[in-house]
Image (tube, rainbow, N blue to C red):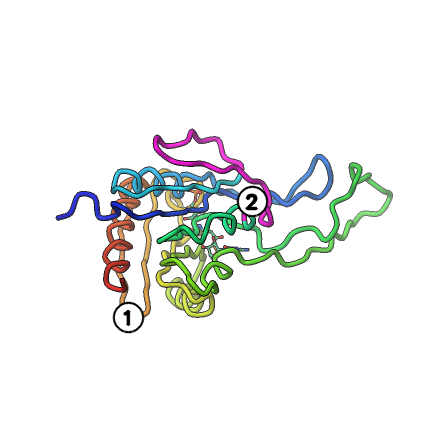
Amino acid sequence: GNLKPLAGLKLMLTAGPTREALDPVRFLSNHSSGKMGFALAEAAVQLGASVTLVSGPVALSTPSGVKRIDVESATQMQAAVMEDIDEQHIFIACAAVADYAPKVIAEHKIKKTSSDTLIIELVKNPDIVAGVAALENKPFTVGFAAETQDLEIYARDKLSRKNLDMIAANNVALAGQGFNSDNNALSVFWPNGQQALTLAPKHELAHHLLTLIADRYYDSH
Ligand code: PMT
């Protein structure tokens, strides 16, 4: 087979969590380590792509040959993505983006009061991958789906609702895969097909997923 199926292609990825500030010292976030997205970035370089990685706060070093842009919030992640998206042939959204952010970021540290409850109002964040897929000249757009049940139903719903070309679903309720694990398993869906990528180290899985993406990309171009 072709050793560099992504040669000549520009590929952008998002990876890691986002942090949504509550006040100067606190935030809402999740357990994404960035491992899956960074493995994809590294593998994409090896397969010949020119890679831009937009990353939330993670403790990983930048894979060699990758252009990395660090961000914190979903809003910042979207701005970094949109800045360079027109150039891209392929976009992969692997980041675990917060769906909601605090409506107001308190200017000073929120004080403990005598009340036993504290209510924080949240507002919906922009959906980054749906925004990319809505562009007139959209790149080949791949989403992820982190689910704890009914994987295929929810993944196919996200595929069509967000107008994606492909979606990679993982079950994040199982031990030894998903968030922060070194291994993962993916069920990949596209409009007319699907493929299961069984449990494997994330770097191995990344090669399989990118090979599948290259196949589908060239089927549609
Ligand atoms: O980082 P690791 O520790 O290696 O873990 C990997 C992972 C479990 C985080 C990864 O494999 C994964 O599933 N990433 C997607 C997590 C997620 O937020 O899934 P979701 O089903 O909530 O979102 C669906 C898709 O929409 C995703 O492509 C997501 O990036 C995108 N999205 C979601 C919300 C938003 N505001 N903007 C987005 O672009």
Residue 134, position as x, y percentages in the image: 48, 65
Question: How far is mark 1 from mark 2, CA to CA?
Answer: 32 Å
Kindly tell me whether mark 2's CB lies below 8 Å from ligand 1.
no
Height in image: 162 above or below 145? below
**Kind of residue indicated by mark 1:** Asn
- The yes-or-no answer for disc 1 within 8 Å of ligand 1 is no
Q: Give the number of the disc on residue 18.
A: 2
Residue 24 x, y percent position in the rendering: 72, 36
**Residue at left 58%, top 57%?**
126
Name the amino acid type tagged 2: Thr
Which of the pair 32/85 is nearer the observer? 85
Q: What's drawn in magenta, residue-wise? A: 57-77
Q: Is residue 61 on the magenta stretch? A: yes
The quarter of the image holding the C terminus is bottom left
- Say which quarter of the image contains residue 27: top right
Above or below, 101 against 157 in this view is above
Q: Position of residue 190 (x, y in %)?
A: 32, 65
Label at residue 7:
none
Q: Residue furthest left?
A: 1
Secondary structure, mark 1, is: loop
> Left or right: 4 with respect to 41?
left
Q: Are marks 1 and 2 in contact (CB under 8 Å)?
A: no
Residue 117 in the magenta stretch? The answer is: no
Q: Residue at x 40, y 54 (%)?
A: 171
* Label 1 sits on residue: 192
| Front residue of 84 and 151 | 84
